[in-house]
Amino acid sequence: MLKSKLQSLPDSPGVYQYFDKDGRLLYIGKAKSLKKRVKSYFRFQNGLSPAPNLSPRIYKMITEVANLEYIVVQSENDALILENSLIKQLKPKYNILLRDDKTYPYIYVDFGEPFPRPKITRRVLKGKKVKYYGPLPSAAKDILDSIYEIFPLVQKESCIKGKKACLFHQMQKCLAPCEGKIDQVEYRKILEEALEHIHDKKLLLAKLEKKMEELAEQLRFEEAAKLRDRIERIRSIELTSQIDLAKVENLDIYAIAAQENRAAIVRMFMREGKVIASSYDTLRFDSQKGFDIEEAYKRVLLGFYTHETPLTSSTILLAHELEEKEELEEFLSQKFGKKVRILHPKRGEKTKLIDLALLNAKEILAKQKPHEPIQTELKELLGLQSEPHRIEIFDNSHTFGSSPVGAMVVYENDRFDKSSYRHYNLESVDEYAQMRETITRRCESFAKNPPPDMWLIDGGETLRSLAENIAKSFGVDIDVVAIAKEKIDAKAHRAKGKANDLIYTKDRVLQLLPSDKRLQFLQRLRDEAHRFAITFHRKQRTQKAKQIELLKAKGIGEAKVQKLLNYFGTFEAIKEAKLEELQTLVGPKAAKSIKELYATR
């Protein structure tokens, strides 16, 4: 079957998907010609086998291929977009998956305004005279606050509309253009000087340090300490400030280093010949599957340069050669409507930049803790497809069916990633339906937030298989494990000394000794999800009680409140409801009281 599909491939651009004998997705790729690209992986002499010129990683993958599917598209650019989208959503076994989908803040100024003021954005804004400064992965607000403290610019959006000098003018933080005390030409000179300090951190830091010393001399130690902390945050966004190019250039610099089962990605942003900011991310991968550094660069570039991102540099430097350089250049050039170049410099000043970025990537790896064996042990114990470097844990909470909530916590890079935690207000009453609702809500976000390596469910085999089936219905194959208290006589014994946890996998049920560190690790994950779910549930229950009391004070009885909740679902929906809808449910008098209550809140 596979051989016949390979021989009938069209000579057209498209995306191909490889599957193993169990139907698991192994790899997604794109091709200018499906026929030429996909056939290049195989040797057709004496049956079907992997081509001898493949990298060890791809050779191993091809040995597992049992089936293939493909999608024909109109152009290679369409194939690149579809490939990137499918990889993020379906998480194939052999593709490199990066999770850095965050957008970085930029400081921008709309020079179309009579008295422009710097502000922060994360996306492209309307207006031909908008200029962007950045990206600034961190400390954007610190830099902006500093600009407003040092320079007498229009401090607030509302100031210029007030037509009258305010407190900022009395504090000498604004020159009151609202009263005509400074004209546009003089104001623009101050603004231009302020904007120079965004790119030249030496100037900015020097002025902040001077201000900090003045505060200390005035014995205003608390203010001086806050300024000291801000200075440190601004200083930390640069890997170095020693390299300044003789030419005034804007460059984005990327370097990736890999070691054993870890990789580090460093980004540096040079504007007007100076390194203004940097950021880095780390990821872990299954060492048995290997690491494709070229694909990692490709994912980094496609992840960073989204449709919403302002393009403040049209030259990208990479620390490694990229085979698909021309294709990515063409894609980004078409996307942004200007020529984008991707370079791997081998001599001159630019090599110092990529050497610096690569050195920092290697330093980041050297400082990381050695890989904890718990992930490897879990893979072997639970029969997982790969080491679970990112785990999502789910739990639900309710009080006799009321105020049900779902919670998801995330464990990645040997720590709980609290910025990725999510909670869900649920409508379902029973535990099974609540978990179905929670998991379904998570699956619906796969396009924006790719699937993890493993799910851990607080529950038994019924909930475990439910989660697995829902994931498969979304086209994703995730290892799903559940953990639950052992039940004796249909009851879970939770008393100290009797709380034996059982671990449910796809193939078996495990009962480990309480001292087993693998069990303790899973219990720790489960307990954190339980804590997060209960905390959110209590908050929701408190808010609900408060809303009920407010309605009671307006003469709305508890029966009518429950009737409203059964119909609208939430208090927010009740607040937004039309008077006619409320009258139908609870009568004119009560409806009027409800509208009066929420009109004042």
Image (cartoon, rainbow, N blue to C red):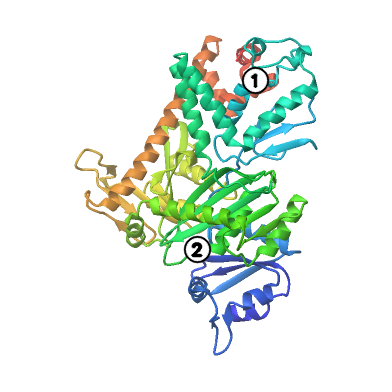
Left or right of residue 416, residue 236 in this image: right
- Residue ID at (42%, 67%): 288
Q: Quadrant of the N terminus?
A: bottom right
Residue 12, x across and y down, in percent:
73, 71
Give whichever of 149, 387 is nearer the camera: 149
Q: Amino acid at mark 2?
A: Lys
Residue located beneath label 1 in the image: 582
Q: Which mark lies nearer to you, 2 or 1?
A: 2
- Examine the rendering and report whether any part of residue 519 can be seen: yes
Left or right of residue 340, residue 95 in this image: left
Q: Residues within 10 Å of mark 2 (few under 14, many from 20)?
A: many
- Residue ID at (48%, 33%): 232
Give whichever of 501, 303 is nearer the camera: 303
Q: Secondary structure beneath disc 2?
A: loop
Residue 4, x across and y down, in percent:
63, 81
Whole-angstrom CA distance, mark 2 to mark 1, is 52 Å
Residue 553, x across and y down, in percent:
52, 10
Left or right of residue 432, residue 523 in this image: left
Give whichever of 165, 581 is nearer the camera: 165
- Residue ID at (54%, 56%): 255
- Label annotation for residue 425: none
The image quadrant that residue 507 belongs to is bottom left
Q: Amino acid at mark 1?
A: Leu
- Examine the rendering and report whether any part of residue 425 can be seen: no
The image quadrant that residue 528 belongs to is top left
Give whichever of 275, 87 is nearer the camera: 275
Residue located beneath label 2 in the image: 93
State whether residue 573 is above or below residue 104. above
Q: Quadrant of the C terminus?
A: top right
Q: Secondary structure beneath disc 1?
A: helix
